Image (cartoon, rainbow, N blue to C red):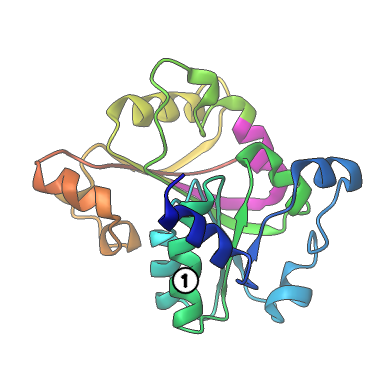
Amino acid sequence: MGKNKLARFAENETFENLFQIPFSRIQETKNFSFKGKWRSDFFGNDNPIVLELGCGKGEYTIGLARRHPEMNFIGIDIKGARLWRGCKTSNEEKMQNVAFIRTHIQMLQYYFDTGEVDSIWITFPDPQLKKPNKRLTCERFLKIYEKIIKPDGLIHLKTDSYELYDFTLNQVLKPLGHNVVYNTDDLYGSGCDSEAVEIQTFYESMYLKDGKPITYLTFSLKG
């Protein structure tokens, strides 16, 4: 393991807005201390909570938090070395509306109560082209989101993978019958004027330079 990675892991231990709870402890207690209490006990406000799943370096978490100090943002990823960057930036900028959790996406129900989350962003996840049941928009994950997101809360998928976009669109429409709010297979050619355009990840900027279209889908779960 490289020295930089070890140094980042060590610094991660000092960030008060990064939570790294051992899987065995979560399994044993079944609940995280802030579950159902994120607003009151961590953020100290009643503002909406927005998740970024598979957040990597937290580029969307940080970008959205800068634009919306009236909202709370939590980035989630299993890679500690990646999370370091978002944690480092949020601490350097003294951002009070940002937190990060190092965990697997399938563990969300241990961290959030029913309807506690207002919206979710999924930005450039691994499309898992050979493993549909591991895609973050497959049915088993949608059922997890359904339990923690408020009724009519929006889920945003932004990806360079047309295969994942098309899979998700069909997954949402049928057989599950959820509600598609907006979709486009060419975000930057669509005339869309939203944060989906205003915030770009590092890899997204590379895709755009290569002329690769970015797809975007917003939907809500029927509950």
Name the amino acid type tagged 1: Lys
Is 44 colored magenta in this rendering? no
Q: Residue at x 26, y 58 (%)?
A: 197
Query: Does 130 appear above or below 194?
Result: above
Q: What residue is shown at x 80% (from left), y 61% (from top)? A: 36
- For the residue pair 171 and 67, the one nearer the viewer reads as 67
Q: Position of residue 204 (x, y in %)?
A: 24, 49
- Residue drawn 30% across and 55% down? 201
Number of numbered discs visible in the structure rendering: 1
Which corner quadrant holds the C terminus? top right
Residue at the farthest right position:
29
Q: Which residue is denoted by mark 1 in the rendering?
A: 88
Q: As displayed, is residue 65 above or below residue 183?
A: below
Q: Is residue 43 visible?
A: yes
Q: Position of residue 115 (x, y in %)?
A: 73, 54
Direction bottom: furthest residue: 94
Does the magenta run of residues contain 153?
A: yes
SS of the residue under disc 1: helix
Where residue 187 sits in the image (x, y, percent)?
23, 47
Number of other residues with Cα within 10 Å of mark 1, as a class: few under 14, some 14 to 19, many 20 or more: some
Q: Is residue 77 above or below residue 62?
A: above
Q: Position of residue 139 (x, y in %)?
A: 59, 26
Q: Nearer the viewer, residue 39 or 77?
A: 77
Q: Residue furthest top?
A: 130
Residue at 61% in and 41% down: 105
Q: Which residues are magenta?
A: 141-156
Residue 74 visible in this rendered orientation of the protein: no
User: Would residue 74 appear left or right of 201 to someone viewing this image?
Assistant: right
Which residue occupies the foreground of this view, 45 or 63? 63
